[in-house]
Image (tube, rainbow, N blue to C red):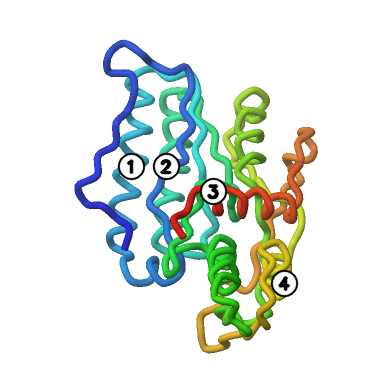
Amino acid sequence: MAINKSAKLYVAGYSGLVSSAVVLILAEVDGIHANATFPGDFLIINLQIQTNVITSSISHNVKKLVFHGSFPTNEWYAIVKISGMKTCEAYKIQNNFNAISLMPTNLYGPNDNFHPENSHVLPGLLRRFHEAKMRQDVKVVVWGSVSPLREFLHVDDLADVVVFCMEEYDGLEYVNVGGGKEVGTKELAELVKEVVGSEGEIVWDGPKPDGTPRKLMDSSKLAKMGWEAKTSLRDGLVDTYKWYLENVKQ
């Protein structure tokens, strides 16, 4: 479990430096196994993080806050994120606090969590295929089945849309942020295998959990505003794997 119960969050501003805008992305997150094993820790820690940042932003008269929500597929994490979105909405109504909420799809990219047990699907696959390649394994076991469908967004596109919405959107309703394309886990695994250069045969471990069957967002609101993701899944995987090779201890 990656949660550090003694960790502290340091916020710039207490020495006279107050930002005109705050982007609240920070959260304690992990994969399916960790979320199911430590639901209480995830609930309390993430509630504390977002409450502290939102209330500090209000008290320091921050001009705009961008909050990041989440799919309601993980009950405990979703409760936290819904609470944060509603807190922003409530203070927008009560104090005219300029806060907006973005709802990004599955994110990936450099600096991701590549833990062998607690990572999300894409970084987990990158590590699994890389290690199989290093061992010259003839088979690579992948959790779950080929049925789930997923949507992904590279972190560079997330950064781009944050700036875009910071400048262009002040609405009360949240905004979905997706890559616009759906990919099956079989296609994803084969693409990761190709990018990594592994030659092992993919073997599906059916008894392992699949997670949510399908995750595809309606990002039409953003499209009408004039924004769309620029990074293809293949290019994003190449970028992420390059970072992994350069930064993760082998």
Q: Where residue 143 appears, x then y in whole percent?
A: 55, 79
Identify the mark at residue 49; answer none if there is no mark.
1
Would you name the residue on which mark 4 appears? 190
Label 3 element class: helix
Q: Say whether marks 4 and 3 touch (CB < 8 Å).
A: no
Earlier sequence position, callout 2 versus callout 4: 2
User: Mark 2 = which residue?
Assistant: 26
Q: Earlier in the sequence, mark 1 or mark 2?
A: 2
Q: Earlier in the sequence, mark 3 or mark 1?
A: 1
Tag shown at residue 246: 3
User: Which of marks 3 and 2 precedes in the sequence?
Assistant: 2
Residue type pointed to by label 1 = Ile
Q: CA distance from mark 1 to mark 2?
A: 8 Å
Q: Looking at this rendering, what residue extends furthest in the left direction?
A: 6
Up-down: is 28 above or below 213? above
Image position, residue 174 (x, y; %): 59, 42
- Secondary structure found at label 4: helix
Residue that appears at 29% across and 36% down? 9
Dot 1 and dot 2 residues touching (CB under 8 Å): yes
